[in-house]
């Protein structure tokens, strides 16, 4: 079967630039790679055909010959060496591996961790750590300095984090020449794997430190002082840069993240910057009005005037008595919610007085009258 035009294979027009040729091949190689087309029996041949086309068009001399003579330029009849020879010859499968290798890093950098220059993994960064810190609502209101004990990996002082006895420098891995990865040719494409000798670090230690056994770090509890700003709430995250786990063999440390949890309070419920406090009042105080004293989150007291005839659920606002803003701004407010309390354990005399009062309170319960009127209307509508 006659060979297809190389420009057609890569989806190019004649006169395409070197950058356009490379870009087109990268796109085709991704589309046609056999690992991505296991259900297509022709993918391998199409993939090799694209590599053959790129091997010719990427070379200025081969491209010039192809543009002038077509495929005949590489069949020994137009001044070019025969397939398998040197120079411009062998534009077929013989040079396919080198053509594919030229763009290997571009094609699979996202899967293999980057190109050749980024494959070295000498000093690995330490892991980030999380610490859950539970504080009281009062502490969240005022802010505080708190000492915490964090179990973590720290740099080994015996080897200064190098992992080698006496702090000696590690030597480049002889298997991967310090690259951290090795390549193997498998058929018509190249496979890159993590170096088995150095586990991708690119270095080996001939005489490991006896304290850390070559890791460059040891397990140890650390005591840190953490500044908790006023206004924090559950879910607030505080980052301590460089206070996480130490890196391998002198690598940079990770970060420590403090996650705040504010414990529930016996008196106050919080919504953003506002606080809510449910205060029981006697039936007499609610009916006649009066003053009550309520606590505030700063440990103080505030007097609140109860209007005459107050009902359960009525709210009164104390401005500025709520929580401070985490990033500044005015304090929130405190809301007092009244809970009118029904008296219990009445004496005979108290019961007698209440019955007497009930007989005299025909016009003192407007909500009850409104409810009873609605009930009567409902029943009348059901009858009709």
Image (spheres, rainbow, N blue to C red):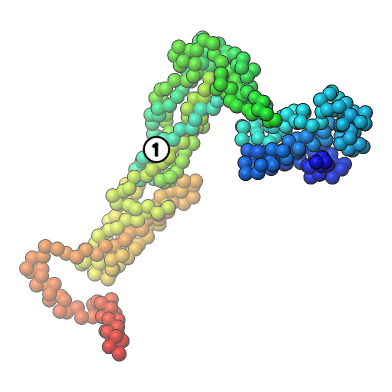
Q: Residue at x 27, y 58 (%)?
A: 279
| Rendered view: 313 above or below 368 | above
Q: Secondary structure at mark 1?
A: strand
| Rendered view: 340 above or below 180 | below
| Rendered view: 76 above or below 137 | above
Residue 350: in sight, yes or no?
Answer: yes
| Quarter assignment of residue 335 | bottom left
Lateral position of residue 307 relative to residue 206, left or right: left
Lateral position of residue 86 relative to residue 51, left or right: right
Q: Residue at x 46, y 15 (%)?
A: 213
Q: Which residue is mark 1?
A: 132
Work out which quarter of the rendered image holds the N terminus and state it: top right
Q: Residue at x 91, y 36 (%)?
A: 69
Residue furthest front in the image: 1
Residue furthest left in the image: 348
Rendering coords of residue 53 (x, y %): 79, 36
| Rendered view: 278 above or below 19 | below
Packing grade of label 1 (10 A; few <14, some 14-19, many >=20) is few
Q: Nearer the viewer, residue 232 or 77?
A: 77
Q: Residue at x 27, y 56 (%)?
A: 293
Residue 252: in sight, yes or no?
Answer: no
Rendering coords of residue 383 (x, y %): 27, 88
Rendering coords of residue 246 (x, y %): 49, 25
Lateral position of residue 166 relative to residue 49, left or right: left
Work out which quarter of the rendered image holds the C terminus and state it: bottom left
Lateral position of residue 217 relative to residue 293, left or right: right
| Quarter assignment of residue 362 | bottom left
Residue furthest bottom in the image: 384
Rendering coords of residue 351 (x, y %): 10, 70
């Amino acid at each position: 079967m006659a060979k297809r035009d190389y420009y057609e294979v890569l989806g190019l027009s004649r006169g395409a630039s070197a950058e356009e040729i490379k870009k087109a091949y990268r796109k085709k190689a991704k589309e046609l790679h056999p690992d991505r087309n296991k259900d297509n029996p022709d993918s391998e041949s199409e993939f090799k055909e694209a590599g053959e086309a790129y091997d010719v068009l990427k070379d200025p001399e081969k491209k010039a010959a192809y543009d002038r003579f077509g495929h005949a330029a590489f069949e020994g009849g137009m001044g070019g060496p025969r397939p398998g020879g040197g120079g411009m010859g062998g534009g077929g499968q013989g040079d396919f591996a080198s053509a594919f290798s030229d763009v290997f890093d571009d094609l699979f950098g996202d899967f293999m961790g980057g190109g050749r220059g980024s494959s070295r993994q000498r000093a690995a960064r330490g892991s980030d750590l999380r610490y859950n810190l539970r504080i009281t609502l009062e502490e969240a209101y005022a802010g505080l300095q708190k000492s915490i004990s964090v179990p973590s990996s720290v740099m080994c002082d015996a080897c200064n984090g190098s992992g080698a006895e006496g702090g000696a420098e590690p030597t480049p891995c002889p298997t991967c020449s310090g690259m951290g990865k090795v390549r193997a040719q498998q058929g018509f494409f190249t496979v890159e794997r993590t170096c088995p000798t150095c586990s991708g670090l690119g270095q080996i230690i001939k005489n490991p430190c006896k304290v850390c056994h070559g890791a460059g770090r040891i397990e140890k509890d650390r005591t840190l002082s953490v500044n908790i700003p006023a206004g924090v709430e559950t879910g607030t995250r505080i980052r301590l840069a460089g206070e996480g786990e130490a890196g391998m063999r002198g690598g940079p440390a990770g970060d420590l993240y403090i996650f705040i949890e504010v414990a529930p309070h016996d008196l106050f419920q919080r919504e953003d910057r506002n606080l809510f406090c449910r205060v029981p009042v006697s039936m007499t105080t609610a009916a006649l009005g009066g003053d009550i004293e309520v606590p505030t989150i700063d440990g103080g007291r505030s007097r609140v005037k109860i209007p005459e005839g107050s009902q359960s659920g009525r709210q009164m606002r104390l401005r500025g008595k709520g929580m401070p803003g985490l990033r500044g701004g005015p304090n929130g407010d405190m809301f007092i919610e009244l809970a009118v309390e029904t008296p219990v354990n009445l004496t005979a005399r108290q019961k007698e007085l209440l019955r007497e009062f009930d007989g005299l309170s025909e016009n003192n319960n407007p909500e009850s009258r409104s409810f009873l009127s609605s009930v009567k209307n409902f029943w009348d509508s059901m009858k009709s």
